[in-house]
Amino acid sequence: MSDGGTRKRVLIVDDEPANVHALASALRDQCLLSFATSGAKALELASAGGVDLVLLDVVMPGMDGFEVCRRLKAEPSTRAIPVIFVTALGDAEDETRGFDVGGVDYIAKPIRPGIVRARVRTHLELKTARDLLEQLALLDALTGIANRRRFDEALEHEWQRAHRARTWLTLGILDVDHFKKFNDHYGHAEGDRCLRAVAQAAAAALRRPADLIARFGGEEFAFILPDSGPAGSGAVVRDLLDRIRALGLAHAASPTVERVTVSAGVISLMPEAVPLGASSAMVSADRLLYEAKQNGRARAILLDFSTGARSELLEAPSDGLVA
C-alpha cells in the first residue's frame, strides 16, 4: 500500500468532524480515503464501488452504525467489505452486537494512531488474500478464463439486470469440432494446448468489460454479451470465428477441414419480452449449436428471438465452405 496504484481505499464514517480528522491524519499516508458523515451517505459511497474497508462510528443521528453495517452485509455488492467499528461504547453487549451484524473489529475512542494503522493494515491484507482466493475459485485452471461457476453467477446477474432495464442480452455456446479425434491423433497434452489457444482467441473477441466467456465443460465454451442485440452480437461472433481461424491449428484428423474449427449457437433476446428463463435460453443456444454441427460444423447459427430471424456465419468461407 505504498503508492496510488496499489493503495486501498478506506471509507471513514463519522458525524463528528474532529473524529474524521483524527482518523484521516492516522491513515492518509497509508490509504486512499473517502468520507461520509451519515449512514445514508456511507451506503451510497460503498454501493458505488471501490471501497476496500469501512471505519464506522456507532453513535450517529438517524441511522446508527449497527444498522449501516447490517445493510452493507445484506447487499451482495458490499457484503465483502470489512467493517471496523470505531466507538466510545465499550461494554461487551455493544461489542457482541457489532460482531453479530458483521463487523470484523473494534477500535476504541479516543483513537491511538498506531493501533488504527495496525488494525487497518491487518484487515486490508486479509481482504486482499480473500479476494485472491475468490478470483482463483472462479477461474478455469486449464484455460485461464472464467469457469462454469463464474458463468452461472454472471448469467443470473445479467439476466435479471436486462429484465429490469428492458435491454438486449446475447448468449452463446461454442464447441471445438471433432475434439475427441484431435486428442486421439495428437494426444491430450496437445489437446490442452488447443483448448487454451481457442479460449484466449475467443476471449480476445469480447471487447467490453461486461462481456464474459467461460469454459462450460470439456471442449465447450459459453459467452454472455450484455446490452448486445443481433447486429452487435453478429459482429462479435464474426470476429471470434476469424480469430480462431487465424490460429491455424492443424487438425489432420478432422473430416471438416484440416485445422481446428468451432461450431456455435447464439441467441439474442430481451428477457423482459420473452417467455423464457435464463436456463431455457441457454438450452435454446445449445440447440442452435447442435444444428450448426448437423449443418457441417465450422459455423455459427444466430437467432434473433424477437423476430425469429436466423443467420449463419461460416468460420472459413475460403476453405470451401459456402456462407
Image (cartoon, helix red, strand yellow):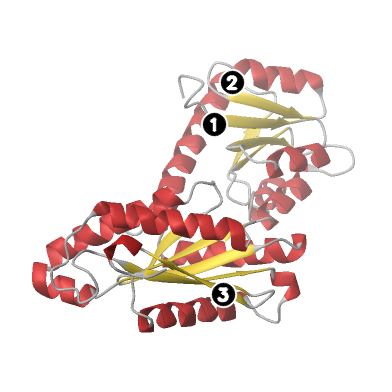
Q: How packed is label 3: few (under 14 Cα within 10 Å), some, or many (20 or more)? A: few
Residue with the mark numbered 2: 27
**Earlier along the polypeptide chain: callout 2 or callout 1?**
2
* In-image side of 272 versus 108 (left or right): right
Q: How packed is label 2: few (under 14 Cα within 10 Å), some, or many (20 or more)? A: some
In this view, 307 is above or below 316? below
Residue drawn at (68%, 55%) of the image: 75
The percent position of residue 59, horizontal first and vertical second, equals 81, 38
Determine which of the numbered discs, if any, sits on residue 310 in the image: 3
In this view, 70 is above or below 129? below
Q: Quadrant of residue 299?
A: bottom left
Residue type at numbered disc 2:
Leu
In the foreground, 316 or 99: 316
* In-image side of 270 versus 112 (left or right): right
The percent position of residue 275, horizontal first and vertical second, equals 70, 82
Q: Quadrant of residue 214?
A: bottom left
Residue drawn at (27%, 54%) of the image: 197
Measure the alpha-carbon separation of dots 3 and 2: 59 Å
The percent position of residue 188, horizontal first and vertical second, equals 14, 67
Measure the alpha-carbon separation of dots 2 and 1: 9 Å
In the foreground, 187 or 317: 317
